[in-house]
Image (cartoon, rainbow, N blue to C red):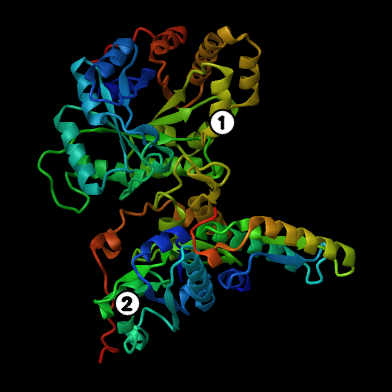
């Protein structure tokens, strides 16, 4: 899922300074799962913003809304009937949500309340880790199910580099060396000799962000 | 001969090779390189120029290599994959060869988080093994990475790095095999303090017959002080400094530690000369280049042989 | 949620009472509460409200005397801090 983290409150307050009537839009999708932008977070943030304004001796009207998903026009459309009454929408969905709001309501400034960080999953409660770089050409079958693009800080296809120490990456002793993980897994699967000696050729990055903005089309589903 | 490299000639003739390295300045100052070069005259068969080592901005390796070439040295261009994509890399390979640089050391490069511009985007379009393969393809097949033909082939002697002390230990010899298969002609290892562990690695390398496919130059770095030894032991990834070395340096008064470090370096080289498969030594005395001559002399490596 | 709401509505101080550490009926409920209190204190600071207005105390249900003591302590403490800036609207107090 997409993992995001709420922006520091000071930054949010600065962003909404010019407005005293705004919509705070949450999302029941990914950001609810990682506790950054779900219904609970909407209520808390709205209260915090109102409190901050009161301290300044000012008022703010916040309409609290939590959409099923902000990455689907069907749900984004649900704001159509009342969005015109507000000056801005502060979205605590991921970057996709903010952009969809901006695209659907070009007259209303759409503000990002979270920093969208990565595609990943929960390691345990309260801890989310990055697992996928969306390179568009998955090679997990060649590396024992561990992604060299994401888990290796240098995205090596023929790792490890010489900086791996005690199974940890040179950039941070808390970060496991991606290639150590791959080698250990290949050993467990009995595939070390077979896979490791194969030289993987330079990656075709054109399927990733480097190739430009991407699109996926299912012709059989298009009306 | 794969290139016109003096280093290649020395190694083919069966001599024990000596290489060292120069770190370029943090400014547009050619004199800084020339001064370092002066210290190495007559001491080395070839000299590496580092490529923004530790991800810190320095004058480019290619420019520095040219300055050293003009002084009569045989430069080894170090190239990392951290900062350049395959387009720039192939371009620089052609440029280096056109300028008469005969050697290239293919490296991945330290992550930019360790350097002075941690906010930079990293590239890593290729890794070191793909880079070795690219140079080999350009040299031996006259083709770019995409398979298209180039006009004049770059005749470069291809080097790679090996770290017998990095983790995981059990694949370090396999990794060397991979680099040899990709096309490496010579290897420079990380600096050695733990001779036992190095011997173990060399045993595996010899077992796999790799010592006959690639020229291995063992890395040696003199320690200036017990503080430096401790720093290398604890703060530099992939470095193995045994406690005996620390103890030995600690056991001499502070003002004598530097000369003790030189002694250790010389003794290390004497031992390396005896190890099967070791074809030379790569002396890295960063910011202490003036000691390289003393070390080479002390280890009986001077004068350097002349080859045609 | 209740904590931030209390301050929004003008409460001058809030104290959270949890079991003694190591004696929680729900095992670690009191530790989780401590973390949440800490989170809200930081939010208060960002807003400009003195985080000291929100405190957590640990005591057992049997400690009636301590409970009264805490209530007196907290009341005095809040009295010293003065009214919640939300009521005066004259800007940040921290």
Of badges 1 and 2, nearer the viewer stands: 2
Residue A101: mark: 2
Residue in the image at 29% along x and 15% along y: B37
Q: Is residue B230 above or below residue A187?
A: above
Q: Residue at x 54, y 22 (%)?
A: B228
* Residue B258 sits above or below residue B221 on the image: above
Task: Say whether mark 2 and mark 1 are on the same chain.
Answer: no
Distance (Cα) linking label 1 and label 2: 55 Å
Q: Secondary structure at mark 2?
A: helix
User: How far across and down, in percent of the image, does residue B171 sit?
Assistant: 51, 45
Q: Residue at x 35, y 85 (%)?
A: A79
Q: Nearer the viewer, residue A78 or A117?
A: A78
Residue B123, numbered label: none
Please tell me how crowded label 2 is: few (under 14), some (14-19), or many (20+) other residues with Cα within 10 Å.
Answer: many
Q: Which quadrant is the C terminus of chain A positioned in?
A: bottom left
- For mark 1, give the secondary structure: loop
- In the image, residue B135 sits, relative to residue B226, either above or below, namely below
Q: Is residue B28 visible?
A: yes
Q: Nearer the viewer, residue B28 or A93?
A: A93
Q: Position of residue B91 (x, y in %)?
A: 18, 41
Pointer 2 indicates a residue of which chain? A
**Location of residue B52 (image quadrant):** top left
Q: Are marks 1 and 2 in contact (CB under 8 Å)?
A: no
Residue holding disc 1 = B240
Residue C12, percent from left and from top: 64, 65
Query: Relative to C53, is B62 on the left or the right?
Result: left
């Amino acid at each position: 899922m997409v993992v995001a983290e709420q922006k520091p409150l000071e930054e949010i307050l600065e962003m909404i300074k010019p407005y005293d009537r705004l919509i705070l839009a949450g999302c029941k999708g990914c950001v609810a799962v990682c506790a950054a932008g779900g219904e609970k977070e909407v209520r808390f943030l709205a209260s915090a913003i109102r409190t901050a304004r009161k301290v300044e001796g000012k008022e703010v009207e916040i309409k609290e809304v939590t959409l099923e998903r902000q990455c689907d026009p069907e749900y984004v459309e649900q704001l159509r009937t009342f969005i015109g009454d507000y000056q801005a929408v502060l979205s605590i969905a991921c970057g996709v949500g903010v952009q969809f709001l901006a695209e659907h309501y070009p007259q209303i400034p759409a503000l990002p309340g979270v920093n969208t960080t990565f595609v990943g999953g929960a390691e345990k409660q309260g801890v989310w880790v990055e697992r996928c770089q969306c390179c568009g050409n998955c090679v997990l079958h060649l590396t024992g199910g561990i992604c060299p693009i994401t888990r290796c800080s240098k995205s090596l296809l023929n790792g490890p580099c010489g900086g791996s120490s005690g199974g940890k990456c040179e950039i941070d002793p808390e970060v496991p060396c991606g290639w150590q993980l791959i080698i250990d897994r290949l050993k467990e699967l009995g595939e070390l000799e077979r896979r490791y000696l194969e030289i993987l050729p330079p990656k075709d990055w054109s399927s990733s962000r480097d190739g430009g903005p991407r699109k996926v089309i299912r012709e059989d589903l298009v009306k | 001969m794969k290139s016109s490299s003096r280093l290649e000639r020395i190694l083919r003739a069966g001599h024990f090779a000596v290489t060292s390295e120069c770190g370029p300045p943090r400014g547009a100052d050619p004199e800084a390189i020339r001064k370092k070069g002066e210290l190495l005259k007559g001491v080395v068969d070839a000299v590496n120029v580092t490529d923004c080592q530790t991800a810190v901005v320095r004058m480019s390796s290619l420019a520095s290599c040219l300055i050293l070439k003009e002084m009569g040295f045989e430069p080894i261009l170090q190239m990392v994959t951290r900062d350049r994509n395959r387009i720039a890399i192939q371009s620089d390979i052609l440029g280096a060869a056109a300028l008469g640089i005969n050697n290239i050391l293919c490296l991945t490069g330290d992550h930019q988080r360790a350097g002075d511009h941690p906010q930079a985007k990293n590239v890593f379009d290729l890794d070191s093994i793909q880079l070795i393969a690219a140079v080999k393809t350009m040299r031996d097949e006259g083709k770019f990475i995409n398979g298209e033909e180039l006009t004049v082939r770059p005749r470069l002697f291809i080097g790679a790095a090996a770290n017998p002390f990095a983790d995981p230990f059990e694949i370090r010899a396999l990794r060397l095999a991979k680099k040899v298969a990709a096309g490496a002609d010579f290897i420079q290892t990380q600096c050695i303090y733990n001779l036992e562990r190095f011997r173990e690695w060399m045993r595996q390398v010899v077992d796999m017959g790799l010592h006959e496919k690639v020229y291995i130059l063992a890395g040696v770095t003199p320690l200036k002080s017990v503080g430096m030894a401790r720093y290398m032991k604890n703060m530099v990834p992939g470095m193995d400094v045994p406690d005996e070395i620390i103890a030995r340096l600690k056991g001499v008064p502070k003002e004598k530690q530097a000369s003790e470090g030189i002694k250790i370096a010389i003794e290390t080289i004497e031992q390396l000369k005896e190890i099967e498969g070791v074809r030379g030594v790569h002396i890295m005395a960063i910011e202490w280049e003036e000691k390289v001559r003393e070390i080479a002399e002390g280890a009986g490596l001077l004068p350097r042989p002349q080859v045609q | 949620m209740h904590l931030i709401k209390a301050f929004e509505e003008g409460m001058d101080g809030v104290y959270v009472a949890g079991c003694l550490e190591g004696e929680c009926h729900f095992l670690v409920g009191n530790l989780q509460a401590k973390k949440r209190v800490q989170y809200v204190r930081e939010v208060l600071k960002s807003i400009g409200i003195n985080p000291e207005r929100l405190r957590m105390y640990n005591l057992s249900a049997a400690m009636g005397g301590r409970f009264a003591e805490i209530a007196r302590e907290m009341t005095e403490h809040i009295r010293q801090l003065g009214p919640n800036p939300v009521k005066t609207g004259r800007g940040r107090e921290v």
